[in-house]
Amino acid sequence: MSYRIGVDVGGTFTDCVLKRPDGTVLLEKAPTTPGDQSDGVMAAIEQVAAAEGLSVNELLAQTTTIVHGTTTGDNTMIQMTGAPTGLIVTRGFRDEIEFRRCYKEDIWDPTLGAPEPIARRRVRLEVDERMTAEGEIETPLDEEGVRKAAARLRAFGVTSIAISFLHSYLNPAHELRAREIVLDEYPDVEMISLSHEVLPKPPEFERTSTTLVNAYVGPPIARYLKRLTARLADGGYANELLVATSSGGVATAGAAARRAVATIGSGPTGGVSAAASVSTKAELGDVVSVDMGGTSYDICLIRDGRPEIKMDWNWFHRYCIGIPMIDIPSVGAGGGSIAWEEGGVLHVGPQSAQSQPGPVCYRRGGVEPTVTDCDLVLGRLDPSGFNNGRMELDVESARAAIAELGQRVGLDIEATAAAAVRLVDAHMTDAIRRVLSLAGADPRKLNLVAFGGMGGVHATTQARALGMQRVVVPRAAAGFSALGLLSANHVIDDSRGYISPLHEVDPAHLQELADDLEKNARAELSVANVPDERIRLEWSLLLVYPGQTFDVSIPVDDPTDVEAAVNEFHRRNAEARLIEARAQDPIIRGVRLVAVGEVEQPKDVTPEPSTSAAPIGKRRMWIAEEWHDDAPIYDMDDVRPGVTLIGPAGIKSPFTTVILAPGETARATDQGDIIIELGG
């Protein structure tokens, strides 16, 4: 017997999916523990072990793979609780991080201040050194200056240091020597982050910002992963812990600790990867995936079975992160979003009750009503069957909290709950509309894939408002991100900088860079026990027109095939901008390698077909702006291929509910996922 485990830490619950050897799936949840996420992870693993009839040690001893999606990096940036961080740069670049390329999140808000600095000016220090754009030493490294800088940073209590020298991606000699000097002067420094290792390519600001964030979040993530790895090992797990990355793949815990910035924004990537797989199998075409959990609402446009990956201009938590990241915009809307009043006006979110104290109905000390409380009062959640029957939701306490809020806004209990739900639905719908508008996508030509613990409760409302025709709620929606992690391939996305005009390109040097990339990628994948026959290499050349800032990644079969890359670069530019620019010679800016270590994909489990499903009960529910006194409730396990349900109705599973409005029909795919036809 061998098991595989996927764990996704959310704002309210930590989801754990167990993949059995026969391909069947077991999902369990445990409350997230913000103080130490490893407590919630181990509690969730304990839940699945008990459900499987095993002890934790017995389960872990038979487990070959554990893939973990963590929000430690995001939480560190949100709360600004990272390591005390210093920055050493080339003389003249001390304040580059403050300029932010003149980027401002809200240009219409004159009161919006600068972000809280990771490294204040007194711990951003300059040293004399300089590399040319050709990688030649123009100014030798001032080693005594580095030594003094390290001593000053140590005196200021800095425990993590970022080093970013000009053009170090072409020649890292000065950064490598600077690290040796810092370690000699400050041997117990917690982390040294070198820009040529974190982001070995231009532009300068993006590289410095990314390196600084890596130094800031690296120590907390390294400590967390070390703690979790030790607990898993003590429990009998003998293999590498794998960690989700922001580009949609997974990496070993050691690699994630060294390049911790790659875990920021990685939490939702498992669900997006699984949504892409579901949409492809069901032949749905292009889709929008939405993940509604307890704290956030994550949105991703998936075209041709692939989510968009942004290469450079990624702003997370008000800092620029220049590594490849799946584009998953997020808004503060979820089951834990708090309903509140100001000036007699009702608001919902973005503040969240999270897992502690949680919604009022959880009986954990929460006093402010949340979306979950409102859905409960409106009959859309089962008070006795929540969290697989482990939690009895307190309806009366939820009603009392909503009643107090209602008095301040002039509405009764049910009207207040309905208004709060209406508001959060509007926030989420507008967020989808904004994402699609920026991408030039028409929602009427897309389908919606909804998951997360609350996704199925609200999805059809948003889809109808956007003019969509179909909603898909995966059978494992409540743990979809954790399930997606189990099918995510190992991905090493790395590049090497090389600036050269087209007529001066040296193919031999390109090949040297490619060989170095391939050697490092294969070494890292071998640590994760990926055999050579499962490694797929995807090459690209990075090109720009003279004067452009950001690289365009052009796929090539051979990293030295410059002619093919240039022709495709011109074609893409003409297609995107309707401007023919073949008279301009582009500039080569580097080589990129995406090395994919393919993991064994879980087997599809096909439910037995059926012709009908009987309701397991009836409940008064508020659906589509009106009450329905006897709406039937169905068990999701009874919704099999061949069964068609007609709304108004609810479909209940151990960890989530799907709501059907009047006239909507639901059926199961061959894999058991629920497809809802909206009609109209």
Image (cartoon, rainbow, N blue to C red):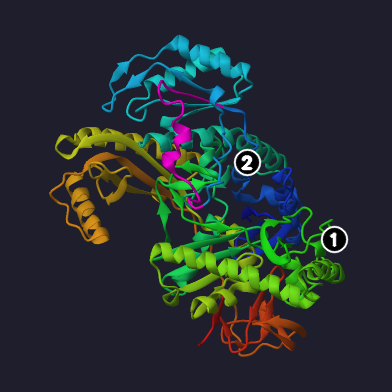
Residue 540 picture location, percent across and down: 30, 47
Query: Are the residues tagged 2 and 1 within 8 Å (C-beta)?
Result: no
Q: Residue furthest top?
A: 144
Confirm whether residue 186 shows in the render.
no
Residue 110 picture location, percent across and down: 53, 47
Q: Is residue 678 above or below residue 447?
A: below
Relative side of 360 to 188, left or right:
right
Residue at image mark 2: 76
Q: Is residue 186 above or below residue 659?
A: above
Residue 216: quarter of image: top right
The quadrant of the rendering that contains the N terminus is bottom right
* 184 or 311, nearer to the observer: 311
Q: Which residues are magenta?
A: 86-108
- The kind of residue tagged 1 is Arg
Residue at image mark 1: 363
In magenta segment, residue 106? yes
Q: Residues within 10 Å of mark 1 (few under 14, many from 20)?
A: some
Residue 65 picture location, percent across and down: 59, 50
